[in-house]
Amino acid sequence: MSDEAVATSPEQQRALEAFYFREARLLDNRQFRQWLALLCEDIRYLVPSRVNVQVDNRQRDQEAMLSVERELEGEDSRGCPIREEGYLQLTLRAERAYKINAWAEQPPARTRRLVGNVELLAQEGSQYRVISNFHLAYTRPGCANALYSGQRRDLLLAAGSGFRLQRREVVLDYAEIALPTLGLLF
Amino acid sequence: MLTGSAGTWRPADLVNGDASLISRRCWTDPQVYALEQRGIFGRAWLFLGHESQLRNAGDFVQAYMGETPVILARGGDMGLYASINSCTHRGLPVCRADHGNARRFICPYHNWSYTVEGDLVSIPQEHALQHRPDKRELGLKRVPRVASWRGLVFGSFDPDIIALEDYLGDMRFYLDAFLQRFPQGIEFMGAPHRWLLDANWKLPVENQLGDVNHGAFLHSAIIPREAQDTIEALGYSVVTAPGHGATFRLMPEDAPVDEVAWGMEGLGGLLGGEEVQAYLRDIQAQAAQRVGPLRARMKGLTYGVYPNLSFLWSNASFKVSHPRGPGQVEYWSWAVVPADAPESVKRALRTNYSSFFGPGGLLEQEDAEVWVQQFRGSNIDHADDHPYFYGLGLGEERPHSELPGLVSVTANEFYARHFFRRWRDDLQAAREDR
Ligand code: FES
Ligand SMILES: [Fe+2]
């Protein structure tokens, strides 16, 4: 994304960050149903697949040669994103966590999300296009510890005194997927 | 670790006669692993890729044969070539991209360059020297056998291996129930998802070969009991040859089209709307004509082709379990879709795979977890006299009048016993002729 951030007032920036900090807290506290309440019901939730691409000779000496976009097999690609989900799938994930037989996370993972680099890229009416970075530390009994890192490209909708999430694309930083699962709520 | 020197144990010590008892060492021992690399991955037909990824001259994809990196390419003569991705000069990989189109592979270190077929075409240093090496002798090492069946491309390091058609044998009957259902066959979507797991390569294989039964238990947070009961009531498990197997449902002749049609039971089919569902119904309407009335009623679950290829019919995915030492696997999976479907339908149907399978899949995150835990459970001391029990349903499989192979209910673990019998015999053969 070549987009530049737009100017925000300190209040606006604080409101955006407050939304993300609360979201991270809900997820780390395993309050997934409260997290669902932050979503628009028509949410698109995407995790593109990341591939090792061939250098395009015609792009040599240009920034485009190294663009992150070229590495992503996203929803408009002819490849296969890791996840392409809506409210239904996210609800399945959230509700599954409270079943006593959800073995993949029994005992549950201990996670800690740090969200930063929050930048407003555009605002049109009540829609806000926002990017942020995250680190997610993951530890679970019987499982190697993991550190996830990535960028989130969001579309937020102003709602009441806060926001709701309408679209999220998670660009994960991995070469090979040496992580226990990409099924988390990033 | 198996005690003593390499000469003091036999594969028959690890897998008993009827393969109802399987040693923990099968999964964890470095000597066993080394023998697998030679006796199985050095000899068998191994899956490399699909022709839909290689439409034009110069198209290539990366693959692995065991731990050996291979480039599979469409040559200038439109033939298929597989070469080991390692420069003849000092061994660097000459290709780094997952897939693409190339005229030459140029080695980064000293720029020896190779054609996509693997032939060496230039040595920059030679102009300064008096003696010019014979480039014909110095190409990338070629995989001696490459063959394609219905677009599925396999390679083997054994120049004398039997023909691929014969190797697949009666698995072709079951694979065709899917592959021939679509007027133009199938297409692989993009690069595989590549997932490193601290597990042994054989457990994902065994799981996909016939372990339908775990669904009701491991996946009970997602799969309702009634759904699993229906699967098992209509379910068959088949072994066409040791190590090859298929599980599927045979739907009643009067079952409604929406219950039989491939693709309808995935989220892509369910949520895809009228366009997707009309496409799937249309395909099912042609099924009897394309694959015959019996196979038209087949609704597949999981398939396995020895040693490490899996196909998940119900969730539209091909998978390969690449060994990375006894305790690690690099698991690859691709979404597969009908080649003739409109682009929008393909995009909807790929989520039949990704919603539940792959590294972000709701179900497969549970499978991955138990595969890792199984390695932990196997890699322990003081329990070697306590092998795993593989005897469920021993001897209960039978021939069938219409279905090729040995047939039984899905709770019968004969698919795994047959796999381990072949595995044991392959290891024994490798020991004998070294
Ligand atoms: S190592 Fe490949 S050119 Fe030298
Ligand atoms: Fe499973």
Image: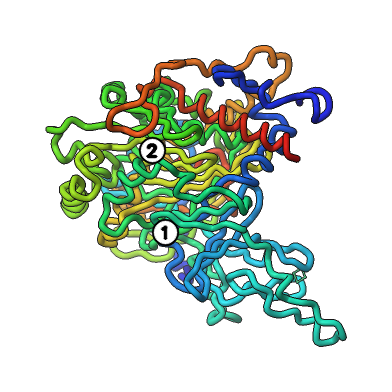
Q: What chain is tagged by disc 2? A: A
Q: How many marks?
A: 2
Relative side of B375 to B60, left or right: right
What residue is drawn where x is 72% and y is 35%?
B431
Task: Determine the CA span between mark 1 and mark 2.
Answer: 30 Å
What residue is drawn where x is 46% and y is 53%?
A170
Which kind of residue does numbered mark 1 sit on? Answer: Gly
Q: Where is mark 1, residue-wise?
A: A79
The answer, for residue B421, to whether it is visible in the render is yes
- Report crowding for label 2: few under 14, some 14 to 19, many 20 or more residues within 10 A (C-alpha): some
The answer, for residue A131, to whether it is visible in the render is no
Q: Where is mark 2, residue-wise?
A: A35
Q: Quadrant of ligand 2?
A: top left
| Mark 2 lies within 8 Å of ligand 2 (Cβ measured) | no
| Mark 1 lies within 8 Å of ligand 2 (Cβ measured) | no
State the image coordinates of residue B417 (x, y, percent, origin top left).
Answer: 51, 24
Relative side of B343 to B206, left or right: left
What residue is drawn where x is 69% and y is 16%?
B384
The dot on residue A179 is: none
**Residues at badges 1 and 2 in contact (C-beta under 8 Å)?**
no
